[in-house]
C-alpha cells in the first residue's frame, strides 16, 4: 500500500513516516502543496494524507485540483483546526476523512485502513510480472513451484520492483522509501534483502530475476 504524505512540519513528518513504514506502508513524504501536486501528477497512490496549512499551496487547494483532474485517490486531511465549518468544507471538497491535530497514531492508522479499504476491494490486489504474482493484501509471493509469505521489508522491496518492472531503482530509492533518510541502517542492507528475495524467487520457480547494474541500482528481468 503506497501513500503520499504532505506535511510541512518535518519532525512530525519523519515520525509519522517511520510509523507508517513500520506498519508496511510505502510512503513518499513532501513538505509543501506544490510538491504534493507534482508527485500526484506523476505517481499512483493508494491514499493521500494532506495537511491543510502548507506553504506554496494549501491542502484544500491540493485536494480541489486533484478532484478537478479526475484523481479519485482517497484523501485524509490533517489540521490543527477544530472548527466544524473547516471540516465540512474539506469533506465537501472531496476529502474522505478529517483528523485534527494532535492525534493518536493508532487512530491515524485506523483512519488510513478505513480510507483505503474500499479502494483495495475495488481493485485487483495482485501484481504480476512474468509467472510471478505478489498479493499486496496478504504479502504472498507465488510462482509455479510454490509460494512464500514475505516479511515487511522484503514485501516492500519486491512491490517497488514489480510496480516498476522496466525501471532501474537505485539503492538510495530503496533506503528512502523503506528505511527512511533518518535510518541508521547501512546501504548494504539493501543488498542483503535483495539476496533474500533472489533465493525465494528461485525457490518458487519464477522466471523473474533481480538484476543489478553496478553502482546504479536494481531492476527486474523476465527470462523467456
Image: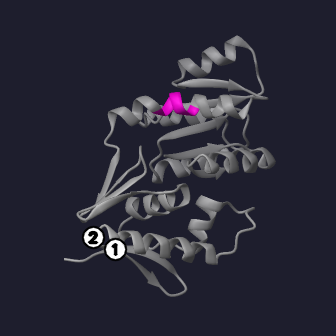
Left or right position of 118 against 93: left
Q: Which residue is mark 2?
A: 205
Q: Can residue 3 be seen at all in this image of the molecule?
A: yes
Name the residue: 36% across, 70% down: 201
Instruction: Give the image quarter of residue 121.
Output: top left
Q: Which residues are magenta?
A: 112-116
The picture places residue 147, in percent across and down from the top left corner, at: 33, 59
Q: Nearer the viewer, residue 185 or 76?
A: 185
Q: Secondary structure at mark 1?
A: helix
The picture places residue 77, in percent across and down from the top left corner, at: 63, 30
Q: Main secondary structure of the magenta part?
A: helix
Image height of 124 relative to 94, above or below = below
- The circle on residue 202 is 1
Q: Nearer the viewer, residue 198 or 145?
A: 145
The picture places residue 49, in percent across and down from the top left corner, at: 61, 37
Name the residue: 19% across, 77% down: 224
Residue lying at the far left in this picture: please name it. 224
68 is within the stretch colored magenta: no
Amino acid at each position: 500500500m503506497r501513500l503520499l504524505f504532505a506535511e510541512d512540519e518535518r519532525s512530525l513528518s519523519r515520525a509519522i513516516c517511520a510509523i507508517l513504514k513500520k506498519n508496511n506502508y510505502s510512503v513518499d513524504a513532501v513538505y509543501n502543496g506544490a510538491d504534493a501536486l507534482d508527485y500526484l501528477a506523476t505517481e499512483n497512490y493508494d491514499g493521500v494524507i494532506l495537511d491543510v496549512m502548507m506553504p506554496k499551496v494549501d491542502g484544500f487547494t491540493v485536494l480541489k485540483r486533484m478532484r478537478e483532474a479526475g484523481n479519485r485517490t482517497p484523501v485524509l486531511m490533517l489540521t490543527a483546526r477544530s472548527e466544524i465549518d473547516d471540516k465540512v468544507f474539506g469533506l465537501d471538497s472531496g476529502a474522505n476523512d478529517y483528523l485534527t491535530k494532535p492525534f493518536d497514531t493508532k487512530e491515524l492508522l485506523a483512519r488510513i485502513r478505513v480510507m483505503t479499504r474500499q479502494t483495495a476491494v475495488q481493485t485487483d490486489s495482485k501484481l504480476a510480472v512474468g509467472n510471478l504474482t505478489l498479493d499486496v493484501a496478504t504479502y504472498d509471493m507465488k510462482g509455479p513451484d510454490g509460494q512464500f509469505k514475505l516479511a515487511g521489508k522484503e514485501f516492500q522491496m519486491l512491490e517497488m520492483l514489480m510496480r516498476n518492472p522496466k525501471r532501474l531503482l537505485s539503492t538510495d530509492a530503496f533506503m528512502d522509501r523503506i528505511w527512511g533518510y533518518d535510518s541508521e541502517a547501512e546501504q548494504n542492507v539493501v543488498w542483503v534483502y535483495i539476496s533474500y528475495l533472489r533465493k525465494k524467487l528461485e525457490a518458487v520457480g519464477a522466471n523473474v530475476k533481480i538484476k543489478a547494474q553496478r553502482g546504479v541500482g536494481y531492476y527486474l528481468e523476465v527470462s523467456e
